[in-house]
Amino acid sequence: MSVVTPFPAIVTRPTQIGFDRHELTRILDLYGRMVAAGHWRDYAIALEREAASFSAFRRAAERPEYCIEKRPALRQRQGMWALIGEHGAVLKRGHELVPLLAPIERRLLKLVSE
């Protein structure tokens, strides 16, 4: 009766990765402005075991123009955020979402002449 059997360690890994409220608000705000400007028409969100991604489409039948990917396993290395272009190339990688979205937001700026 003096033998204590250890309880097996429970690994608490999330079954899927997702966006929190602030991240999703920032992404959907950009999406709304791009729709209003006529650049994008559709989007898709994929929540998987290793990564969560937001894809923006010019037309629903095409490949996504941009894919914003959150991969927490790369948090300590290159940064957990990645901006992926239409052909699958990583355009920008970082630790924060706001600087990652800067190249897309630059498309919204228009030169106003007097």
Image (cartoon, grey):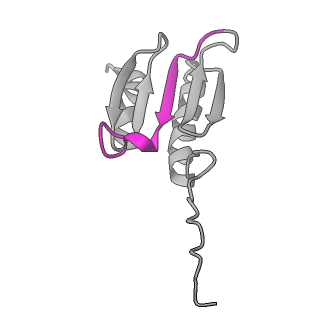
Residue 96: % across, % down: 36, 44
The relative height of residue 21 versus residue 69 in the rendered view (above or below) is below
Judged from this view, the residue extending furthest toward the right is 61
Residue 57 shown left or right of residue 81 in the figure: right
Q: Nearer the viewer, residue 28 or 64?
A: 64
Residue at left offset 34%, top offset 20%: 111
**Magenta region includes residue 73:** yes
Q: Read off the magenta span.
A: 62-79
Residue at left offset 59%, top offset 77%: 5
The relative height of residue 82 versus residue 2 in the rendered view (above or below) is above
Residue 101 shown left or right of residue 113 in the figure: right
Residue at left offset 58%, top offset 82%: 4
Quarter of the picture containing the C terminus is top left
Residue at left offset 52%, top offset 39%: 27
Name which quarter of the figure residue 11 lies in: bottom right
Residue 97: % across, % down: 40, 41
Judged from this view, the residue extending furthest toward the bottom is 2
